[in-house]
Image: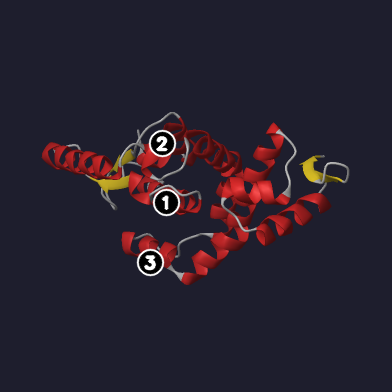
Amino acid sequence: MCSGRVDLAFVLRAFSNGADGVFIGGCWPGECHYITEGNYDALSNMHLGRKLMEQIGLDPQRLRLEWMSAAEGGRFAGLINDFVKKLKELGPLWNGEGVGGNGLKLKLEAVNRLVPYIKLVEREKLRVPSKSEEAYNAFYASDEVGGLFHVLIADKLAISQILLLLEQRPLSTADIADSLGLNAAAVAKHMNSSSRQGLVRYDLDRKCYALA
């Protein structure tokens, strides 16, 4: 299977099911068996996945992409052993980052719900100008992409998490901030935006927000 077929949703599902790490192996750049050069799609997904993981408090080293050919069995074994060693250093997923199991599941589900939108953003706004590993690495490390990620994805991810919390029960701004590790001002901004879109409503009697 081409490494370009590894969807972000697959990676998120693996972490949601308790995997401590995800390793993706692809053909060397320039040696893809398909005219689509899917290994560059895999590289883009790896960078996006790591940015999303950082946003929800997961160590991005838990997601790894490496190049190898079918003839490089020794390289594959060495890379896997090194990855396993790193995961042991990081510790189990559910407590290695200091995020409780239920909290992490909620964050991962919030990201998963945004995958179709993230794909749209990637296709429309995050197009790398040239096909080379160096270009992709430099592009995703740039301040421009960092700013786009914050404006186009980070805020929507925070709102996605808030809406998931409100599916469980109505909550005050302070409750939401405490649950997600956000400051109250940021939560208030997101609630105002979500209220204007008709996603949430404020219950005056209970002094808390609920789904509309």
Identify the amino acid type marked 3: Ala
Locate residue 96 relative to residue 70 in the image: left or right.
right
Secondary structure type for disc 3: helix
Quarter occupied by the N terminus = top left
Q: Residue furthest bottom?
A: 143
- In the rendered image, residue 164, in percent from the top left (x then y), is placed at 65, 38
Q: Nearer the viewer, residue 212 or 134?
A: 212
- Residue at screen point 43% across, 62% down: 140
Identify the amino acid type marked 1: Arg
- Residue at screen point 36% across, 62% down: 137
Q: Which corner quadrant of the image does residue 109 belong to?
A: top right
- Find disc 2 in the rendering and name its residue: 94
Locate residue 104 relative to residue 173 in the image: left or right.
left
Secondary structure type for disc 1: helix
Are the residues at dot 1 and dot 3 in contact (C-beta closer than 8 Å)?
no
Locate residue 22 relative to residue 186 in the image: left or right.
left
Residue 50, numbered label: 1
Q: Residue furthest right?
A: 205
Q: Nearer the viewer, mark 2 or mark 1?
A: 2
- In the rendered image, residue 160, in percent from the top left (x then y), is placed at 64, 45
> Callout 1: few (<14), some (14-19), or many (20+) C-alpha neighbours within 10 Å?
some
Of the two numbered discs 1 and 3 on the same chain, state the one appearing first in sequence.
1
- Find disc 3 in the rendering and name its residue: 138
- In the rendered image, residue 75, in percent from the top left (x then y), is placed at 14, 43
| Up-down relation of residue 46 to residue 131 (above or below) | above
Identify the amino acid type marked 2: Trp
Cα distance, mark 3 to mark 2? 32 Å
| Up-down relation of residue 53 to residue 77 (above or below) | below
